[in-house]
Amino acid sequence: MKKILVIAPYSYLPYFSGGQKFIAKFLDHLSKKVELTVISVAENETSLAKTYNIIPLLKKKFSRYYDLSLAIKITALVKKEKFDTIIWEHPYYAWLANHIRKKTGVKFILHTHNIEYQRFRSLGRWWWPILKWYERWSYKKADSIYFITPEDKNFAINNWGIEESKCVDVPFGIDIKSYPKNREENRRLIGKKHGIEADEKILSFNGLLDYKPNLDALKVILDKINPLLLNHSSFRYKIIISGKRLPEKMNLLKEYAERNIVFTGFAEDITSYLKATDIFLNPVQSGGGVKTKIVEAIGFGVTVVSTDSGASGIEKNVCGKNLVTVQDNDWEKFAAFTITNSNSLSITPESYYNYYYWETIIERLIQ
């Protein structure tokens, strides 16, 4: 069995964001096929890592990214344990990855979640050109690169001259391999829990709510899309908003309670909510990378109405009728598509599960 070392540069257990969940699920499924060790920060709840070992070698502070002592520590560990490969989550430690490869000869695999500089540019960070240079350099140095989307892979090949043979598709996956059979049961339970009538459609949105792209999307739902839906008096619905770290000034969305908005806070079992949902709203317009919430929603049999930007990175050819896209900022059409698509049930096609099921993804990777 292969011995793999992974460097995860921040806390991901328990997970609250899509990025954290991507790492957690990837490592969980990978560890069932290889002998896995992870180097990360001490803030992880290590009891949640049931099939691999976590070594808390990284500092909590930002200085961990330029901690020179890591070169000696990780090099010694790699030589002692004789790892076959090292996978580095994100490009931030590329300087260290390159150094350790020189010292040990062990391959340097870069696992990307998006094109990082584009994400930070969309968030208005002034230093994104520096990151762009460093990120391109890291891609050039890596022996292999795992890409979450075909768009990111093609960007690296066409814009940065990265060899195609180095590029591997590793999408964010789902844990179910077929269309769920208990959607009606979950609809009944969630409806009862939140006082939603049987003839009311359930629309939903979830995410880490202090993350700017998600917060901006939430504000669009509250102030642009929902008022348009309210104008259609014959359309009966509730919008369920779930997520952690809603800004305090938004007062738990209490002022929207009379406008068909249900705020749950962080949902421990988000899958129950997704299985109860008719339409998942995704008016996200920034942030870069694949929106993991869309991947999961479609897997649980939900139809997603999304902006073009929000659907970036999704393999649309396998989504069937479960992904409906609208031009960015066209909220009238967004609301109209939400209403029309809520009245028809779309069964997620088998091809979707063939592409996005975690075990299949890892099997392709191992091969």
Image: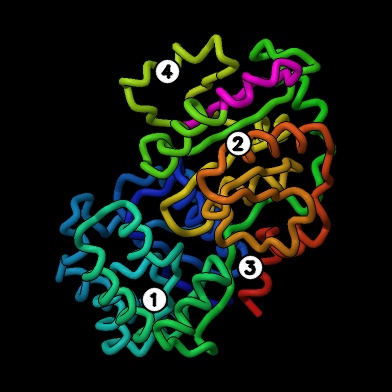
Name the residue nearer the viewer: 93 or 156: 156
| Residue found 39% across the figure and 56% down from its top | 54
Q: Any magenta on residue 239?
A: yes
Mark 4: amino acid: Leu
Give whichever of discs 4 and 3 has the lower sequence position.
4
> Is label 4 in contact with label 1 (beta carbons under 8 Å)?
no
Q: Which mark is residue 332?
A: 2
Tag 1 residue: 81
Determine the secondary structure under disc 1: helix
Name the residue nearer the viewer: 293 or 326: 326
The part of the image, by quadrant, that contains residue 129 is bottom left
Tag 4 residue: 252
Mark 3: amino acid: Ile
| Residue found 36% across the figure and 86% down from its top | 140
Residue 113 image offset from top left, x and y in percent: 46, 62
Determine the secondary structure under disc 4: helix
The part of the chain drawn in magenta is 226-243
